[in-house]
């Protein structure tokens, strides 16, 4: 099945900054349209100013280089529906954790407070050091149990 | 630059094309110049964590500007890069408050930037932006309504960031508070320019794109008053002392910024910015 092969190819496209998590696991894939020999991949940008989007676009095109039936591959970024962090799959959350990044919390209070566990020791005694980490989608936290700083994916919810 | 699909349906905008252009230019130009002012702080913020946070916020804001220019691209058939970099001073629609320099000096030569002014300008602006996005979300132009939902998700963190600085510096008392009060006065002098919707306000409202200036300002006050009360800050009356940017009136500060930006753009028009 061509569609299965296409999804497999997309599964091979990883987040340029987190090499173990694919764009599918991040919940960026909204839909694909096959109109042979043309393929259109619709993605949801995580953050609008994210410099990785251009790289992802190029990598998606590269993933279909060996598909003889597909001679035209387009990547479109959609604004709607907005990407939210609950789109990250269970496996994506696991991969993030293995990479040393805490997955986004699934629950945020009405005041916007959130809590994540330490990805190293699992402790709940963590404090937010900097809401804005090295990239738009991550924050920097500190574990008071194992005394390690760590990164967490920011929760993004359509409140 | 990344292309975002903008499903422009000409019928949505045919009743008031000028009003829609004007609104998109205002939104794009506001974010564009403030993101530029933010990027000038790189390496100069009060401490390293703030440097990281502020540059991340400026990157988001430039992303929003790019998206608004891309929405325009579909309506005026000029590419987003040229819209951002090649329009002359008199065609710019940003509020004058946002083009003002960060402080005396140049970012390369003896910058003596004013952090209090930056905190107040950004906090007041992002709150006004939030109020506008909420209005656009309910607006009649679908591509803009969808964009507003997306921007709002990111804006949430910007508001949190600037609110923290704003309250902490005012609560600190002493010199910090004195400088913050002075900054609030300076920002208030031109804050009306941010709410101003220009000459097409009536058509914008009648076409259902956005709510009136008056309504936007009232909602801003409703959000801000409890915070200001708690900090015992009396808000000076808002004005538009330096002129109306929505009418193409601008200062030398913008002229200088645009020529710097243009130099970089002309060196390499394909540079990602
Ligand atoms: Zn730990």
Image (tube, coloured by chain):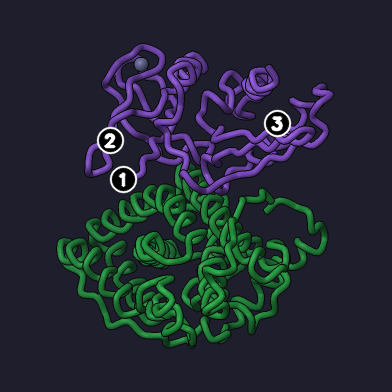
Chain colours: A purple, B green
Ligand 1, by image quadrant, is top left
Q: To which residue does mark 1 refer?
A: A159
Q: Position of residue B234 (x, y in %)?
A: 20, 74
Tell me whether circle 1 and circle 2 mark residues in contact (CB < 8 Å): yes
Number of residues whose C-alpha sits closer than 10 Å to that of mark 2, classed few (under 14), some (14–19) or many (20 or more): some
Nearer mark to the viewer, of 1 and 2: 1
Q: To which residue does mark 3 refer?
A: A60
Q: Circle 3 — which element?
A: helix
Q: Chain of mark 2?
A: A
Q: Tell me if the residue at label 1 has its CB under 8 Å from ligand 1.
A: no
Q: Circle 1 — which element?
A: loop
Alpha-carbon span between mark 1 and mark 2: 10 Å
Residue sitting at 36 percent across and 85 percent down? B239
The answer to whether marks 2 and 3 sit on the same chain is yes
> Residue B183 vs residue B9: left or right?
left
Q: Quadrant of the C terminus of chain A?
A: top left
Alpha-carbon span between mark 2 and mark 3: 33 Å
Q: Position of residue A95 (x, y in %)?
A: 50, 16
Residue sitting at 49 percent across and 43 percent down? B48
> Residue A44 vs residue B87: left or right?
left
> Residue A46 vs residue B85: left or right?
left
Q: To which residue does mark 2 refer?
A: A108
Figure label count: 3
Q: Earlier in the sequence, mark 1 or mark 3?
A: 3
Q: Circle 2 — which element?
A: loop
Note whether residue B127 is visible.
Answer: no
Q: Earlier in the sequence, mark 1 or mark 2?
A: 2
């Amino acid at each position: 099945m061509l569609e299965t092969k296409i999804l497999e190819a997309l599964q091979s496209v990883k987040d340029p900054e987190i090499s173990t998590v694919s764009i599918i696991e991040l919940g960026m894939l909204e839909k694909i349209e096959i109109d042979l020999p043309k393929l259109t991949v619709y993605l949801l940008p995580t953050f609008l100013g994210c410099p990785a989007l251009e790289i992802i676009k190029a990598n998606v095109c590269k993933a279909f280089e060996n598909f003889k039936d597909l001679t035209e591959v387009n990547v479109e970024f959609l604004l709607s529906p907005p990407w939210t962090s609950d789109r990250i799959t269970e496996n994506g959350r696991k991969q993030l954790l293995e990479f040393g990044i805490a997955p986004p919390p699934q629950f945020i209070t009405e005041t916007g407070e959130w809590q994540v566990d330490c990805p190293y020791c699992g402790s709940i005694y963590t404090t937010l050091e900097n809401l804005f980490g090295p990239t738009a989608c991550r924050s920097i936290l500190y574990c008071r149990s194992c005394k390690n700083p760590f990164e967490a994916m920011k929760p993004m919810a359509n409140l | 630059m990344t292309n975002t699909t903008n499903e422009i349906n000409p019928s949505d905008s045919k009743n008031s094309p000028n009003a829609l252009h004007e609104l998109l230019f205002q939104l794009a130009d506001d974010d564009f110049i403030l993101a530029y002012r933010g990027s000038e702080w790189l390496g100069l913020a009060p401490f390293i964590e703030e440097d990281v946070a502020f540059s991340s916020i400026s990157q988001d804001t430039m992303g929003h500007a790019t998206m608004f220019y891309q929405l325009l691209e579909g309506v005026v058939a000029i590419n987003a890069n040229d819209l951002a970099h090649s329009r002359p001073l008199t065609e710019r629609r940003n509020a004058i408050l946002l083009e003002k320099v960060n402080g005396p000096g140049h970012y390369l030569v003896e910058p003596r930037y004013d952090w209090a002014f930056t905190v107040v300008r950004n906090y007041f602006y992002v709150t006004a932006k939030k109020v506008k996005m909420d209005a656009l979300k309910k607006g009649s132009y679908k591509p803009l309504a969808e964009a507003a939902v997306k921007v709002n998700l990111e804006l949430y963190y910007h508001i949190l960031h600037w609110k923290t600085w704003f309250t902490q510096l005012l609560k600190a008392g002493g010199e910090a508070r004195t400088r913050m009060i002075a900054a609030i006065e300076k920002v208030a002098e031109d804050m009306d320019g941010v709410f101003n919707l220009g000459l097409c306000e009536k058509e914008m409202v009648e076409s259902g794109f956005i709510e009136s200036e008056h309504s936007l300002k009232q909602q801003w006050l409703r959000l801000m008053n409890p915070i200001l009360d708690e900090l015992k800050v009396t808000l000076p009356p808002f004005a538009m002392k330096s002129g109306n940017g929505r009418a193409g009136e601008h200062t030398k500060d913008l002229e200088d910024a645009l020529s710097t930006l243009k130099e970089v753009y002309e060196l390499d028009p394909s540079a990602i910015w």
